[in-house]
Amino acid sequence: MIALPHSTTKGPAALGVDRLCWGPAKGRAIIEDLRFSVHPGEMLAVVGPNGAGKSSLLRCLYRYQRPTSGHVRLDDEDIWSLKPRAVARRVSTVLQEPASDFGLTVAEIVELGLTPHLERFSRRDYRPVEEALALMNLTAFAARDFASLSGGEKQRVMIARALVQKPDLLILDEPTNHLDVRHQLEVLALLSALSTTVIVSLHDLALASAHADRVLVLDKGRQVQLGAPLDVLTPGTIRRTFEVEAAIDSHPATGRPRFSFHLNQTTT
Ligand code: ADP
Ligand code: MG
């Protein structure tokens, strides 16, 4: 278990999602009637095909989009009854498209994660920043201009910034997209070792299965399955949701589930 640089007084958050619906004003519902809870310290992976509603769901969870109906509760409090700053002190996010040019160095970007906590921690306290940079293998990049980094390096900086915020709930939208294989594995291993509650959308079903405590499968805005990875990521569910055939066996070196996919020629 890795404790974050500063633990908050409340500790890992529980999240409750109750009959959650969201869609653009006057538009069709994009997510419909989602009901689940995430336990303190748990890591939940959200998977589903492109357009399933993963990002829309996450935007509701970090209090960016107000539900059309239903509720999102952080430790039993509706997040829309909390002030944005109160949510920012407990929930941090890593979003899909990190802004590319802030004109800041890597260390300055990571330091931004301290902003919600400035009443408690001096801006000159660089220890949490240094710890987060080290966790993300970014120490050598601290003085670099953020804009000069590769996509994967930027992604790791945004994860370091989210860690410095010492969240009780960490929400990440496809954080492994730009990462090479080694950094994908390292980031997922780190996330699952964190003591905090983590909700992460992932494309890679093998990564989700190997690292998450539970997996939520979304399709067309609906909750298809929620449960332990191997109970949920079955060939039948994968066929119905992703429209591919899956073979699942055990990796000879790690014993972890190994997924291989192919198109079902008879259905196309
Ligand atoms: P995912 O992250 O699973 O790929 P998204 O949540 O980004 O899915 O999108 C789900 C669907 O909702 C897509 O069809 C997308 O075009 C649509 N959508 C998302 N946000 C909006 C919006 N603000 N207005 C209209 N449609 C939207
Ligand atoms: Mg998305």
Image: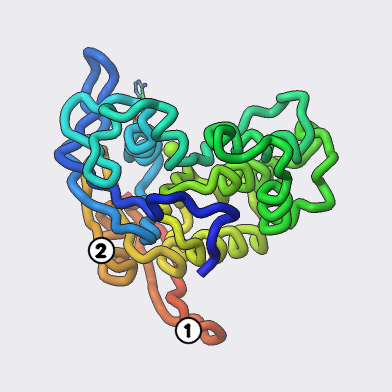
Name the secondary structure under disc 2: strand
Give the structural element (helix, strand or loop) at label 1: loop
Q: Report how far apart the C-alphas of labels 1 and 2 lie in the structure.
A: 20 Å
Which residue appears at 17% of the width and 28% of the height? 69
Quarter occupied by residue 70: top left
Q: Nearer the viewer, residue 61 or 210?
A: 61
The answer to whether the beta carbon of the residue marked 1 is less than 8 Å from any atom of ligand 1 is no
| Left or right of residue 88, residue 104 in this image | right
Which residue lies at the image location 28% right of the left edge and 28% below the top edge? 80
Q: Amino acid at mark 1?
A: Gly
| Residue 45 placement (x, y as % from top left) | 39, 55
- Residue 98 horizontal/vertical position (percent): 61, 33
Look at discs 1 and 2 and give the one toward the viewer.
2
Which residue does the numbered mark 1 point to in the structure image?
255
Pinpoint residue 266: horizontal percent, then vertical percent. Answer: 30, 57
Picture coordinates of residue 129 (x, y %)? 69, 47
**Residue 227 — which label?**
2
Reading the chain from its start, which is encountered first: label 1 or label 2? 2
Total numbered circles: 2
